[in-house]
Amino acid sequence: MAGGADGAKSWAPRNARVFDLSNRIPTPGTFLEWLRRLEDPGLYSGDVGVDHTSPSAPPEREAPSGSADVHGLVMASSASPGSSLAPAALEILPSILVQKMSQEKVNVLKALGAEIIRTPTEAAWDSPESHIGIARRLQAELPNAHILDQYANPSNPLAHYEGTAEEILDQCDGKVDMVVMGVGTGGTISGIAKKLKEKCPGVVVVGVDPEGSILAQPEALNDKNRLQSYKVEGIGYDFIPDVLDRNLVDKWEKTNDQESFIMSRRLIREEGLLCGGSSGSAMGAAVRAASTLKAGQRCVVILPDSTRNYMTKFLNDAWMFENKYVENTVHTRENYSTYRKETGTWWSSQPVSVLALPHPSTVAPHLSCAAAIETMERHGYDQLPVVKENGTVQGVVTIGNLLSMLSSGRVSRADPVAAVTFGNFSRVTHESSLAELATIFDKDYFAVVTSTDGKIAGLATRIDLLNYITSAHKD
C-alpha cells in the first residue's frame, strides 16, 4: 500500500476477483465469490505482511521497540502468512507449523529460505510443544528475532479493514447484504466486518468455524467434537485470539471436514475455482446461511486459499478414499506405495527391528494424570503410549501437554490420562524401513511401533535412530 504526500495510506485494489455463482446456488440471493489471484503468495493472509511492512504505517504499528535490530522473523502460522513474509526476513529463522499442515506448504516455505519446525496437531495452544509455545521459546533464545504474532498484532484486522473490505465494496458497488468467511486468527473477519457494518449497516456477518474448534458462539455450538482434531487447515483454534472481535459476528456456522473437502472439489470441478479446503468450508456454510436471503440480495463468500497447497491431500482421490470422505472416487482403487525405500543411504532399507527397541512402559486410558507423571518421572520418559485393555494403542501422552493442561486448570491430577492424550500419532511395524521412520521424524518426535494386529510393540524416538546410525557400521 502506497502512502500519500501527507503520509496517509491510500488504498488500491490488489488483484482480487469477484465471481457470480448465483445461477449455480439454489438460494434466493445472489452469490458472489471473492477470490485472490492464485499467484499471490499468501492470498489474503499476505495483506498482513504488506500492511505491517508498509513504509507509511503509523509509528505505533511499524515495529516493536528496537526494530532496527530485528534481523529475523519467527512465524507460528498455517503457512500462508509465512510464505508472504519469508522473503522480507533479513535472516533465515524458523516458521513453525503444526503437523497437519500440508507438505506443499512446507515445500514453498523451504524454497523461500525458511527453516521449518513441525509441532503436534493436538498440542494445547499454550503448551510448550505447540507452534505458539515453540515460537515464543525461539524468540527468547535467538538474538534479534521478532514474532509478528498474527494472533495479537493489530495490523492483522487493520489490513483487512483498510484493504480487503474496500476491495469487496469497490467490486460490489457498495452493496453487500451478507458476507461469509472462515475464522482462524480472526483478523480477516474482524477487519472486514467492522468496515462493512460502517458502510452497509444491514449486512449480516457469518463466521465459519470447523468442528473441533471453540471460536463459535453461543458456546453450545462447539460441543460436537469439542477440541478434537480436524484436517481442514487455516481456520479454527482451541483458544480465542486477541484480534478476534466476536461481537462483530452476527451468526456462526459449524462445518466438518467431509462437507468442506467435497464442496472444494465441487468448486474446482464445476466453477474452475482452484481453491483449498477452507474455501469449501466457507461455501458450504454460505449455502446454509444464505437460505434466509430474499431475491436480489447479495452474499459475498471469501475463498482464502489455493489448490496449490493441497495437491497430495483432498485433491488426491486415494486420500479422500482413505479418510472416508467419499465411498469411492475412482472405479478401481489405485495400487500405490505409501513410501519409496530407494533413498540411497546404507541404513535406509534396514527394518525397524534392528533398533532392538524394548517393550515400552504404558499407561491405561483410565489411569490418572498423576499416575502418568509418576511413571514418566520414574523412567525419565517425555512421552508414554496410552494402551487399551486389549493391547491396542489409543494415543500418546506427553509431559509438555500434561504440564500445560494441569497448569491451566483444564484437567486435574485425578483426571484420567485419556483427557490429555494425543489421538493422532505416527505408527510403524518392525518390518517398516528405517527410511520410512526417518521421514516420520521430519515432522514427529516419536513413532509407535505396533504388531500386525495393532498391539503395542515399542516406541521409537529420533535418538533411537540416531544412535543406531552412529553406532552401527556398514558392512
Image (cartoon, rainbow, N blue to C red):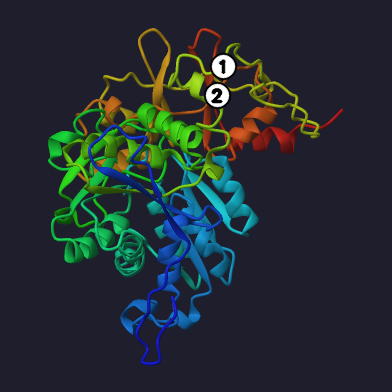
Name the residue rendered at 77%, 33% in the picture. Answer: 343
**Left or right of 369 on screen, residue 352:** right
Residue 62 vertical position relative to residue 215 in the rendered view, above or below: below
Residues at badges 1 and 2 in contact (C-beta under 8 Å)? yes
Name the residue rendered at 51%, 61% in the picture. Answer: 84
Name which residue type carries label 1.
Answer: Val
**Left or right of 43 on screen, residue 363:** left
- Sequence-first disc among 1 and 2: 2
Q: Which mark is residue 317?
A: 2
Mark 1, residue position: 330
Residue 121 visible from this viewpoint = no
Query: How many residues crowd around disc 2 within 10 Å: few (fewer than 14), some, or many (20 or more)?
Result: some
Q: Residue 464, percent across and down?
A: 61, 33
Q: Secondary structure at mark 1?
A: loop
Q: Nearer the viewer, residue 286 or 87?
A: 286
Query: How many residues crowd around disc 1 within 10 Å: few (fewer than 14), some, or many (20 or more)?
Result: few
Spatial separation of the CA atoms under disc 1 and disc 2 = 7 Å
Residue 358 vertical position relative to residue 196 in the rendered view, above or below: above
Q: Residue 245, percent across and down?
A: 20, 57
Q: Quadrant of the C terminus?
A: top right
- The quadrant where residue 352 appears: top right
Q: Residue 277, percent across and down?
A: 43, 38
Residue 372 vertical position relative to residue 453 in the rendered view, above or below: below
Q: Residue 59, percent across and down?
A: 34, 84
